[in-house]
Amino acid sequence: MVPRPISGVRLITLTSDFGLHDPYVGIMKSRIVQRAPGIPIIDLTHEITPFAPEEAGYWLYCCCGQFPAGTVHVAVVDPGVGSERAIVVLQAAGQLFIAPDNGLLGLVATGDVEARAYQVGESALLRLGLAPVSATFHGRDVMAPLAAELASERLRADQVGPQQELQPGRLQRAVAYGDGSVHGVIAVIDRYGNALTTIPASSLGGFRRPQVWLAGRQLPLVRTYAEAGAGECVALINSSSMLELAAREASAAQALNARAGQAVYVDETLRS
Amino acid sequence: MVPRPISGVRLITLTSDFGLHDPYVGIMKSRIVQRAPGIPIIDLTHEITPFAPEEAGYWLYCCCGQFPAGTVHVAVVDPGVGSERAIVVLQAAGQLFIAPDNGLLGLVATGDVEARAYQVGESALLRLGLAPVSATFHGRDVMAPLAAELASERLRADQVGPQQELQPGRLQRAVAYGDGSVHGVIAVIDRYGNALTTIPASSLGGFRRPQVWLAGRQLPLVRTYAEAGAGECVALINSSSMLELAAREASAAQALNARAGQAVYVDETLRS
Amino acid sequence: MVPRPISGVRLITLTSDFGLHDPYVGIMKSRIVQRAPGIPIIDLTHEITPFAPEEAGYWLYCCCGQFPAGTVHVAVVDPGVGSERAIVVLQAAGQLFIAPDNGLLGLVATGDVEARAYQVGESALLRLGLAPVSATFHGRDVMAPLAAELASERLRADQVGPQQELQPGRLQRAVAYGDGSVHGVIAVIDRYGNALTTIPASSLGGFRRPQVWLAGRQLPLVRTYAEAGAGECVALINSSSMLELAAREASAAQALNARAGQAVYVDETLRS
């Protein structure tokens, strides 16, 4: 069971690679509002790199903890629309996630051992009056109305279709090596040029004096942006409790020539 | 009469060339919310090419079918603000459209033979407490409050002023030639580089084996993006039931050197 | 006392340099909605130049008059997050403004002689369950929930902490010289390339035939964009009642090589 939110507020969030240049996001909202009037819709971002589902999944992984229990997240990064890829509903961390099964939700699912995914089936679509479906815009025709039904509690995740294994995504959780070091990658570069990694704060608990490495360069671990010198590149635990590479009032990505996919690791400072 | 929405939900949508860099959209929303609290406002896009009203009109033409009966659409692309151009309310397809009379609504009006346009008059503005009006921001001072009044059903379209003919826009509906071919143009290039045309799916019903032409190049007509080879340029009927030129996970506009205004036509494949 | 809005509608607005590329704005909205469900949230802009608080302050100064009494504005441009800079609540012009005390609110405060600012203190945060606070995202952890509490009238501005003087910002109100001329600067360049200045319409009341100067060039003062010739650079009083440099359907900033910070002044035409 997805728990009821304590505040009584249920939310729907939207994430996509639609951009804001075209009306596709507004069209999805029209569908949601008609089936779930009164439920607030919050945009996470529509500026996911086109056709990069793992980027959307990383943001959901980082920020779903900021949303109340029962929130329904819709993520549409769907280069395979019209092909045989499934649409899935993932129940994890007390929330629901609707997305194409193209690896987008892989990282989110790893965050909860009790996570369960369900493949959206033809019979559920027929029952909800959603079939037949367009060949090119499942965000509008399937995912938006499903989100409305789930958020309104007229539908449970386990009623959309059979349980199934999710496609793993290109982004994995950070890994601890035998020598105690922790290895991850840069997942996204944000608007400020901060490089956000897959290494969670929790995996750094065992270090006495952790040092952070990117491409052979060691970065000092600080507590806030303000502790860095002007333009200095540092590592810190960000507001999502993830390891982030940053520079004070400057782009760390530019200064470090960092890009998504690049390896980052943390080990113990041995010499004092 | 504009029909009542079945769901009971009335919506207001906003389209403009304001961009999101400045607070102009937020200012319009403030005006709407004060007069129509509780009516959801949905952004279609604010990234219309500055001073290109026909682009806004094309999007409204394509996507108004996705909105419930009674929706009020406001479109502000208004290079002539402060000149003698009128503001009009168009009643068409069971919905209302508020815009400057600069060609923006020409294409939308052609979609409904019973469409009626009314010129917003001084006396309606006085009655609503909207006069005098600023010289530079009629979106805020006239169109936003009018939308609130119309959506709240305190005002009917035929009460804003006298009926009038709309200025035709630069974009026309696609035309069928005597030889059976159908001729239109590229109306907009979307965020993915898809080229959206003025040719509706309905105009292709008479073809047995339609072929699509752009600048002397023939494009295969497929059903979904996934049917195209990687980077291959194809034509398809998109989710708005319009003919679209697309490439799989690539920009068709770039690959085809396509731009808004360019001619596209469809004819019958004669040889097998 | 902040007056109650006549319409009964209370609003929260958001302004930041977060951009829309990342989910930071959506995360703030989640926090607000959970504490103040049903209160509309309006985005002013999230495209403030990174680390330029005075730009956010200028927009608030220009457009707060368009919002109802009691509106709560949150502005997060916060390069000093994690340092010792305070967070303040400013009560001015019948509205509330929450921002870091880094000069952002200087210009807004000058608009109301009865303006009062209060420094958000540890004890208020503890009482609201907001302590301890993250080191990097006070917009989410302090400003968003404070806005919800203030807009819901569960908290008054004078209850957040002691009254204090605001840091003055880099932007000052326009100044009248002894010779009658009025001197200001360009504050922001908007999406159309209009250059918005710090000179309010009210300061031009004493001129019989005002002339506007930028970098030794005189610009004609007109009433609307439509009065300018195609591409001609002019000055006008804009919809926020501020002096603006504009060009008809073109970028004045480009034509004039204008940039934020540049001096603009107005004097009397002496010869006829």
Image (cartoon, coloured by chain):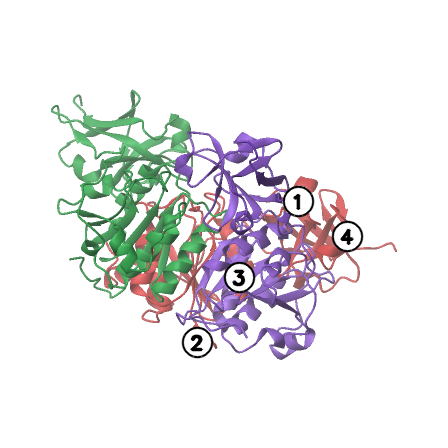
Chain colours: A purple, B red, C green
Vertical placement of residue B107 versus C166, above or below: below
Residue B85 shows in the view:
no
Q: Whole-Å distance between the Cαs marked 1 and 3?
A: 22 Å
- Of badges 2 and 4, the one in the foreground is 2
> Taking B40 as reference, is B218 left or right?
right
Are both tags, 3 and 2, on one chain?
Answer: no
Q: How far across and down, in percent of the image, does residue A112 sit?
A: 58, 63
Q: Whole-Å distance between the Cαs marked 4 and 1?
A: 16 Å
Q: Whole-Å distance between the Cαs marked 3 and 2?
A: 18 Å
Q: Quadrant of residue C126?
A: bottom left
Q: Quadrant of the N terminus of chain C?
A: bottom left
Residue highlighted by disc 4: B220
| Discs 4, 1 touching: Cβ within 8 Å | no
Single out the residue that lies furthest toward the right.
Answer: B272
User: Which kind of residue does numbered mark 2 sit on?
Assistant: Gly
Q: Nearer the viewer, residue A109 or C15?
A: A109
Which of marks 2 and 1 precedes in the sequence? Answer: 2
> Taking B144 as reference, is A17 left or right?
right
User: Which kind of residue does numbered mark 3 sit on?
Assistant: Ile
